[in-house]
Amino acid sequence: MASRKRAASKGRAATIPPRQESSVPPSHPGSSLNVRLVLVALVVAACLYAVFRAFQGSEKPKDFKVQEISAFTGEDKACGGFSAWGIAPIGKDKVVLADTNHSRLLVFDRQGKFIRQWGGLGKGPLKFHEPSGMTSGNKGDAYVMDAWNGAVKGFDENGKEVLDLELGDNSGFYGPRGIAFDGQNFVIADTGSHRVVIISPKDNIVAAFGKMGKGSGEFNGPLDVAADGKGNYYVADSGNNRMQWLNAEGKVLKTFNYDGSVPAVAVDKEGRIYVAISSNDSRVRVYDSKGGYLGDLKDQNGSGAAFGDVHSMNISGDDVLMISGGSRVSMFQLPAGNNPAN
């Protein structure tokens, strides 16, 4: 419409209407002062509101102190360097790592001693295509989200396959990365389809929540999910820079917003929630079972840099927090009860 108006006026001189004298009477000298006072009040109110919004839902930083057990890489071990995504407890006292770039799983003890590996790029038994999130079952087994093979694969600590659950071509999954186990079913962060899916070990979809978006119960590239076994699911809604807490029906109970993306989330048997935040000040924020802020994860010496950037987290039944961050793994003993060891 605007282009037609310009074309119609081409070649014609612009007509400027004659100036009209204003019929508005001059204002009272005091009215100008009143207007200025109102404007100042509005500016002050806007600033106060901005400060309120900046601190709304945020917490005054404090420490949640934990005891470091070990920190290791693969550079000095027979397995060589790794690019870790998922991490989970396996067996009684071991940890299994999804090395996504090398399409393999690696098993270590809690002090970082390398034990064994299996896998390779491909489709079929003991093969992976970008293994990603990991979780543990009830019998010491561990399960990995085989993202581009569209499968959940389970193993015991010796590498014996105990489950090969193909998600199916018509199930709507696209590049799922995160996985949890709620005691009965798997809970999957279906990253590319922007949803959370609950699926049984027999490949029956129990429920699916969400779609792409910014609204409550919507997601943007969720990377991880955790389950407390009591019908609560915690979703790392990474692209929306938040964590959403859902109940068993998919209703959002709480939303936690941050200044960076959320790559990982975990929950321990006390119900404490751990949220990794990736920003200029990467950190792990810890909440109690009701969502009350407990502090930011620090080792006993007060250093928060011991775990570096976080890619995945998981927690054993005896409260050992396992964190993978690319080429590094860190392990911490969590304090008993709901209070941090300040």
Image (cartoon, rainbow, N blue to C red):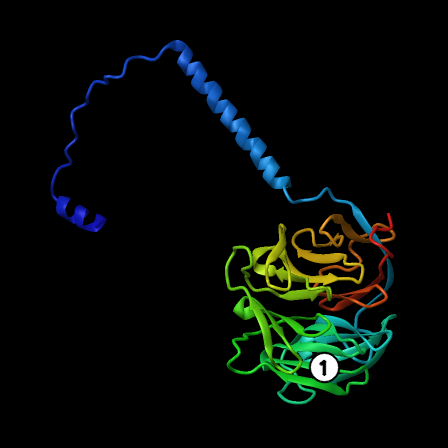
Q: Which residue is mark 1?
A: 154
Q: Is residue 230 above or below residue 53?
A: below
Residue 37, x across and y down, in percent: 48, 19
Q: Could you say which quadrant of the image residue 234 lies in?
A: bottom right
Q: Disc 1 marks which amino acid?
A: Gly
Residue 235, x across and y down, in percent: 64, 62
Total labels: the figure holds 1
Q: Could you say which quadrant of the image residue 173 lies in?
A: bottom right
Q: Which residue does the image show at 53% across and 32% down from the upper left?
A: 46
Q: Which residue does the image show at 59% across and 76% down from the upper left?
A: 205
Q: Is residue 307 above or below residue 197?
A: above
Please, which residue is most extreme toward the bottom here? 125
- Label 1, residues with CA under 10 Å away: few <14, some 14-19, many ≥20: many
Foreground of the two, 77 or 244: 244
Please, which residue is most extreme toward the top here? 29
In the shown orientation, is residue 237 left or right of residue 307?
Answer: left
Name the secondary structure under disc 1.
strand
Residue 291, x across and y down, in percent: 71, 51
Residue 45, x across and y down, in percent: 54, 29
Foreground of the two, 52 or 113: 52
In the shown orientation, is residue 38 left or right of residue 115?
Answer: left
Q: Is residue 290 above or below residue 18?
A: below
Foreground of the two, 267 or 177: 267
Q: Is residue 243 visible?
A: yes
Q: Is residue 120 visible?
A: no
